[in-house]
Structures are given as C-alpha cells and as structure tokens.
Image (cartoon, rainbow, N blue to C red):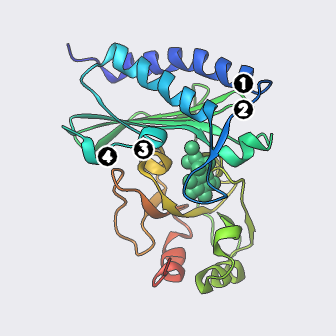
Amino acid sequence: MVSSLMEIDMQVKQGFKEIISFIHQSLSTELTIETKSNRRDLVSNIDKEVEAMIRAKIKEHYPSHEIIGEETKQTEELQSLEHVWTIDPIDGTTNFLKQIDHFCVLISYYENNVGKLGYIYDVMNDDLYHAMENEGAFLNGVKIISPAPISLEDGLVSCDIGRWHTKSNFAKLVNQCFDIRNFGCGGIDSIHVFHGKFAAFVNSDSGPWDLAAQLIFAKELGLKMSKFDGSPVDYLVGGDYILANAGCYEDIVSIMKGYES
Ligand code: IPD
Ligand code: CA
Ligand code: CA
C-alpha cells in the first residue's frame, strides 16, 4: 500500500505526542551519559531510547522503509533509496544534559533522494515545525512566511564559536556580519533563519540527521543551503553547510571558500 504524504504526516504528528511526553518525563530522571568521539561529544540513555521509539514507530507503519539514525547510524547499510528517514533523537544533547532549554527532535523523510517531509520539534517550547514538499513550512500548523532579504552587514549569523575561533574564515564572518549568536542546537539555530531572525546558520561536521530536515524547510522557504564552496549538500552524507537568507548567501560563500577543517 502506498501512503500519501498527508497520511505519513498525520502519523508522525501523532507519534510525536508520546515521544515528547517521554522526553519531558526524562528531565526528572537520572541519566546515563557516555562520551562518543571526544570529551565534548556526549550521548545519554534518553538519546538512544528516543531514537529506538521513533524507529519502532516508523517500522510499525512502514516496515520496508530505511532509517538513518544518529545513534544507530547505517547510511552504508541502506538497501534502497526509495523511502529513507533520518532521525536525530535529541539535537543539542549538550544543552539537554546541562538543562538548557534549547534542544529539539529532528526527523526527515525522503523518497528517491527527494525531500518530502521535515520536522523540528522544539521540546521546551512545545513548538512543532514541519515542512512538506510543495506545500510550505509551518509552525504549529500555521504557514511560515518566507523571510525578507537580509544583508550580511545587518544580519546575525550563527556558528559554533568553540569549534571555529581559530579559523580565519570565522574572523572574516565576524567582521562582516552584524554579530554572532549560537544556540548550540542546529535545529533551533535553523529555526531562527526560517523566521528571518538570523541571516544564516553556518555549521561544520554534520551528520545526515543534522541537516536532512533543514534542506526541505530551506526549499519551501526560498532559503539557500549548500556546502561551504556553494555546491549542493547531500543529505545522505552530511558535512559542512551554510543555511542562509538569500540576501547574504553569496557573501557567506565567498567568505567560507577555502575553509580547511
Ligand atoms: C550538534 C548540535 C550543534 C551543531 C553540531 C551538531 P547533537 O548536534 O546541533 O549545535 O553545531 O554540528 O552535531 O550532537 O547535539 O545532536
Ligand atoms: Ca544533531
Ligand atoms: Ca543528537
């Protein structure tokens, strides 16, 4: 049986109720925390449990669909690209663990490499952002208006200062934009670009789960999204990316060209 995007969207929204309630309950429980690639790269039992819950829900309705999840990566194991989901169960894990409000759940759904549905659930504000191919982007069901052009000179730019302060590109960006801000949660930083509060979010070393949903929002909102050199982002690979308002995108690409990680 082939499900319409509307049906899938309804199921995801229904599924979020249980997931978000579980995350809220987890805030008062004792967490098990482990390090991953380095001492700043943390994962908790809740990240893993939320991913398992989302996976189980997808598999219950769509057993043949493929899933790329941050905590159980398997891009290399995909059998088909016909139906692919990405999951970042808790985006902004450091904030979550340090009890800072800015963390979210990121989910996307692609068919044959085309982004169909994107979700960003801002947990503490209880705000659900969703985007559907050719239908637009929405906050709690209300359509988001594409932001007006913002020049780099007037724009706030988000990037991870801790990771970037030694980069010459970063110094140029700081000099040319209005100022720098960063929530430490790619999903929440991206939301600020959707609303035109930030001119851009510039991020490095992302996994597919960090950017796949945002690609769908960017298309629906007329925003620009690419790698640092201006080439297209591959949602199956991840990597470095610029999500920017059309009014400053070209300037940021010029600054980021030649970036070395
Ligand atoms: C990270 C956050 C961070 C961004 C990193 C992501 P995580 O996700 O979104 O703001 O700069 O690139 O990996 O590890 O908290 O899911
Ligand atoms: Ca993430
Ligand atoms: Ca995560």
Q: Are marks 4 and 2 in contact (CB under 8 Å)?
A: no
Q: Position of residue 132 (x, y in %)?
A: 41, 33
Q: Amino acid at mark 1?
A: Ser
**Alpha-carbon neighbours of circle 4 within 10 Å: few (<14), some, or many (≥20)?**
some
The disc, 1 or 3, on the residue closer to the chain's N-terminal end is: 1
Q: Position of residue 85 (x, y in %)?
A: 36, 34
Q: Are marks 2 and 3 in contact (CB under 8 Å)?
A: no
Q: Position of residue 215 (x, y in %)?
A: 43, 49
Label 1 to label 2, Cα distance in Å? 8 Å
Label 1 to label 3, Cα distance in Å? 30 Å
Is 122 in front, or is 152? 122
Q: Is residue 163 left or right of residue 203?
A: right
**Alpha-carbon neighbours of circle 1 within 10 Å: few (<14), some, or many (≥20)?**
few
Location of the N terminus by quadrant is top left
Is 140 in front, or is 169? 169
Element type at marker 1? helix
Label 4 to label 1, Cα distance in Å? 29 Å
Q: Residue at x 54, y 57 (%)?
A: 37
Q: Is residue 248 left or right of residue 102?
A: left
The disc, 1 or 2, on the residue closer to the chain's N-terminal end is: 1
Q: Which residue is mark 4?
A: 75
The disc, 4 or 1, on the residue closer to the chain's N-terminal end is: 1
Q: Which residue is mark 3?
A: 216
Image position of 246 with respect to 13: above or below: below
